[in-house]
Amino acid sequence: MCSSSGKEGDNVRTPKPVKSVSEDLLEVAVSFHGHLGPFLALGLKAGLYAVEVLGKEPFETKAVVRTEPRPPRSCFVDGVQITTGCTMGKGNIALKDGEGLSILISRREKRLLLKVKADVLRAAEEVTSKNMERIALSILERSAQDLFEIEEATE
């Protein structure tokens, strides 16, 4: 995949490093999902970064998450739904069986592929009930560039 050009008029946004998640968004996410864990946090971060790059247009955006389709990895999907507006109900997000944990998000001719880095994925899988929230909060404070391998493209 090649990087988008950023030429004037092609509506490509230059993303800021997404660092933290607002308390309000976190409250909505925890209420929706049921608890705060690292995979929810990763989904929130991925979705927020996608919105920075592609803009938020829930009816124009599609997302495909690839991972093991069961908890805790599938919890990632809830974070993405909350931040991007892609939902299972609208049918514009899909969960597919795959290795690792990645998301391909597209809007019009723009695509963004985020792959959770191997060390981040290992750390997320090694949480216990005692350190789950602390690990999730630490993920929320990291930049998208620290958490994901990122590829942008235009079709």
Image (tube, rainbow, N blue to C red):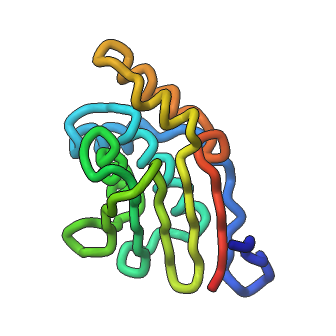
When asked about the image quadrant of residue 59, the answer is: bottom left
Number of numbered discs: 0
Q: In the image, what residue occupies the spot 42% across and 81% down?
A: 60
Q: In the image, what residue occupies the spot 48% across and 68% down?
A: 105
70 w.r.t. 56: above or below: above
Where's residue 154, x and y in %?
65, 81
Q: In the image, what residue occupies the spot 22% across and 45% down?
A: 32
Where's residue 133, x and y in %?
37, 23
Query: Is residue 132 rendered to the left or right of residue 33?
Result: right
Which quarter shows the N terminus? bottom right
12 w.r.t. 97: above or below: below
Where's residue 35, x and y in %?
25, 32
Which quarter shows the C terminus? bottom right
Where's residue 150, x and y in %?
64, 57
Q: In the image, what residue occupies the spot 33% across and 59% down?
A: 97
Query: Is residue 94 rendered to the left or right of residue 154?
Result: left
Give the farthest residue toward the top. 130
147 w.r.t. 84: above or below: above
142 w.r.t. 46: above or below: above
